[in-house]
Each structure stands twice: as C-alpha cells, then as structure tokens.
Amino acid sequence: MMQKLEYIEDNLQTVNRAFLFGDAVWVSFFVRNSELIMSEESYFFLMASMRKMRFNIPLSYTLEFFQELFKKEVLEKDVQSAIVNLMVYRQQDNSDDLPKATTSFYFEVKTMTDPLSIQSSIELDMIKEINVNSNLLSNIRVHSPENIYASIYAKDNDLDDLILLNPNKRIARSIYGNLLFLQGNTIKVPKQTEGAYISPLMENFVTFVHKNKLAEIEEAEVIAFESQKSDEIIRISDEKGIHTVSKIRNKTFESTRFTEMLEAWKASF
C-alpha cells in the first residue's frame, strides 16, 4: 500500500516564492531495499536544475548532506522502498535581490513496493490544444501550467496521462514523465531538444539496455502519430515510477519485451 510522508524545514515561510510564483524545482531520489540508489545521478540533476533556475545554492547542499538527511528522515523511519520527491524553492526574504534570496527545501516520500518495478498499466491519449516548449527550462521539473491543465483534462476524460507535443507537433513527453517507444528492436526516445525531461531514472535504464545490447537506442524526433506504430510503450516518471502503456485511443499495446528488459535491469542493482 502506498503511503506518503513529508519533511518540512524548521525555517519554513508559508508565504514563499514557490507558493506565490511557482519558483521552485523538483528532483526525485530513490529508495530500494532500505538503501538510496542512483543518489549521485539525482544529486547532480538537482544541482544542474538549481543552476538553470539561478538559485543561490548553499555550500551545505552537498551530496553527503542529502544522503545523511534521507538516511535520518527516511531510511531510519523504516521506509524500505520509495520515491522521495524533493522541492527546492526560494524564500521571499530578498525579493528585491533574487540571486541572494534564501534557498530552502521540502520533500515528500511516497512508499511503494519497488521504484524499479512496473507499477501498473496506463491508458493515454494525445492533447492538441496546448503544447510544451523545448527551451533551456523545458527539461527540468519546474512549475508548468501545461501540466496542470493536461492533468485535469486527463481526469475529466478517464485517462491516466496525456501525450504532450512541442510547437513542431512532435512528441515531447507526457504530463508526468518520458515515453519510450519500442518498434522492432529499436527503442525511440524523444530528444531533450524536443522538450523531454531529463530523467536520472530513465537514463539509468536506457544506459543498461544499450550496454547489454538488449535493444538499439535511438534519440529521435518522434512525430505525433508514430506512437500508433509502436509494438510497446512505457512511461518512465521520476515522480511516479514506471508504467507500461496498455492503450492509446483504439490501439492496444503489449508489454512483454519491456517487462523482460526491466526485470534484467532490476537484477543488476
């Protein structure tokens, strides 16, 4: 059963720039079998995201700091497997000089059986009335009105997620993560320049598949309806985990090959 825990710093200001303006970045860390996994990849993505958003990065924000924090606040509280969604945000204490504004953080812990396992199968559709950009900030998890609109649209239409296009009408990502399309022996992954998220979880999986020659990896510009040509599709979301796609409109998909690859990947940890 999924359970959610929260951690809030002592210096929390309820009126902060995340609350007022969405001035924050989100990065996920992963707990498996009572251990942090891929913590370096997640940490370096956090630092890169903060630099892109021009945060004042405290000297105390080291890899060891976050490892010790999660050990104390997550692992020692008997959390065995989970996704830790960390939000770093700017305080409102120096609004006239944002580069010097105090940086704070908050995180929530979503427990699950295994963050590397397939959580469930999901049903998607494509939304055309909005699109996502493909610029410097499109690859990191920041405030996105497009995601909010699309998540409500999906809920209203009994869907689990939506395929989001970029201004060139090519596939960028879904609301919650990246989509991987298996055609024959090739996995097509939308390029980051197309608006896909940077994802430590996905990059670890794709690297494993490539090194072990389980399939060819192609970073591609994926046209809107190429999803219908795929044999199998998965969504990898740092926030929600891994899901197979069972249906897009009237097309149904198998998940045999991806399941085999994911099982081999899990066994490598």
Image (tube, grey):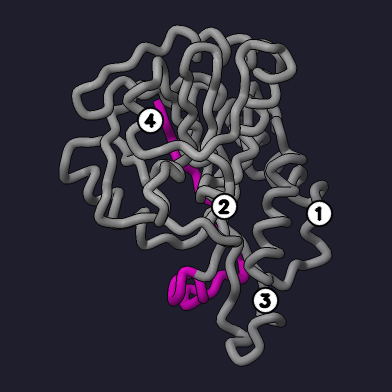
Q: Which of marks 1 and 3 is nearer the N terminus?
A: 1
Q: Report which residue position mark 4 lands on.
A: 226
Q: Which of marks 4 and 2 is nearer the N terminus?
A: 2
Name which residue lies at 60% across and 61% down: 136
194, above or below 245, in the image:
below
Q: Report which residue position mark 3 lands on.
A: 102
Question: Which amino acid type corresponds to the residue marked 1 in the rendered image?
Answer: Thr
**Closer to the camera: disc 3 or disc 4?**
4
Q: Which of marks 1 and 2 is nearer the N terminus?
A: 1
Q: Report which residue position mark 1 lands on.
A: 62
Name which residue lies at 32% across and 41% down: 162
Residue contact between numbered discs 3 and 4, judged by CB atoms under 8 Å: no
Q: Earlier in the sequence, mark 2 or mark 3?
A: 3
Spatial CA distance of label 3 from label 4 is 45 Å
In magenta segment, residue 18: yes
**Closer to the camera: disc 1 or disc 2?**
2
For the record, the magenta segment spans 1-22
Q: Report which residue position mark 2 lands on.
A: 139
Q: Is residue 110 visible?
A: no
Dot 3: what SS? loop
Spatial CA distance of label 2 from label 3 is 24 Å
Question: Which amino acid type corresponds to the residue marked 4 in the rendered image?
Answer: Glu
Question: Which amino acid type corresponds to the residue marked 3 in the rendered image?
Answer: Thr
